[in-house]
Amino acid sequence: MLLAENPARCILIVGGPGSGKGRLCERLVAHCGVSHVSCGDMLRQEVQADTPLGREVSGIMQRGELVSSDLIVTLLRRRMRAFPGKRLLLDGFPRSEQNAKDFESQCGVPELALHLKCTDEKMVERILRRGQLENRADDNPETAARRLRVYHDSSAPTLAWLEARGVPIVELDCNGTQENVWSQLLAIGRLMRGAVAV
Ligand code: C5P
Ligand code: MG
């Protein structure tokens, strides 16, 4: 049974740790009338509030591994109910082929995936910089290495599965500045103006 909140309007934001998913989402929210759900933030809130779920996932997150797909999809579905009929950015989702399959069977086919591509060097540089500014248990060299490995192991099959399901995937070069990423999207937007049915 599919969700009532128009799942075809979900935009998947896929990218490694430090690829700029959160920043891009903030900007899309500010300029494009979309809403934003960050899987990592949802999990961190559970950890912070010391809920049973938070206690279950905190070690997994600290090690840089993925939580069970059932768990994250359940959390996501719960949060999505707050945004009926909205176009919704799913930040950090899917992280695995199982995430993608579970989402489709419970919520339907997403509208689009943005794939934020970045070199490992850039991602590590950003993670370590963020680690000095924010207090994230997983922004340290050891966990960063594990997160990158998990990303490399899981992203190709995840994207391949989405592609096979007919989900359009737009790749963005995210090695440069946020401004540069934004200009890539603006250029596509300008090209497509007039052809787009909202
Ligand atoms: O997206 P972000 O880097 O904030 O995610 C932080 C952590 O949350 C990941 O390293 C992983 O442990 C967990 N996560 C997950 N499944 C998702 C999204 C995040 O297990 N779909
Ligand atoms: Mg994030």
Image (cartoon, rainbow, N blue to C red):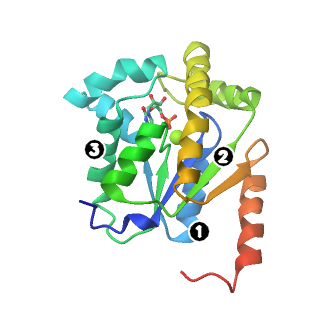
Q: Which mark is residue 74?
A: 3
Q: CA distance from mark 1 to mark 3?
A: 29 Å
Q: Is residue 118 left or right of residue 79?
A: right
Residue 141: give x, y in percent of width and height: 62, 15
Q: Quadrant of residue 60?
A: top left
Q: Which mark is residue 104?
A: none
Work out whether 35 lies above or below 177. Answer: below
Q: Give the residue type that dot 2 points to.
A: Leu
Task: Please tell me whether mark 3 sits on a helix, a strand or a loop.
Answer: helix
Write the residue at 34% across / 52% down: 105
Q: CA distance from mark 2 to mark 3?
A: 25 Å
> What residue is pinned by disc 1?
31
Write the residue at 78% across / 68% down: 187
Q: Nearer the viewer, mark 1 or mark 3?
A: 3
Residue 40 visible in the displayed image:
no
Write the residue at 30% across / 34% down: 46
Task: Please tell me whether mark 2 sits on a helix, a strand or a loop.
Answer: strand
Q: CA distance from mark 2 to mark 1?
A: 19 Å
Q: Give the residue type that dot 3 points to.
A: Thr
- Of mark 1 and mark 3, the one earlier in the sequence is 1
> What residue is pinned by disc 2?
116
Task: Give the class, few, some or many, for how many residues have Cα within 10 Å of label 1's Cα (few <14, many ≥20).
Answer: few
Residue sitting farthest toward the bottom: 194
Q: Is residue 84 left or right of residue 175?
A: left
Task: Please tell me whether mark 1 sits on a helix, a strand or a loop.
Answer: helix
Work out whether 78 lies above or below 30. Answer: above
- Of mark 2 and mark 3, the one earlier in the sequence is 3
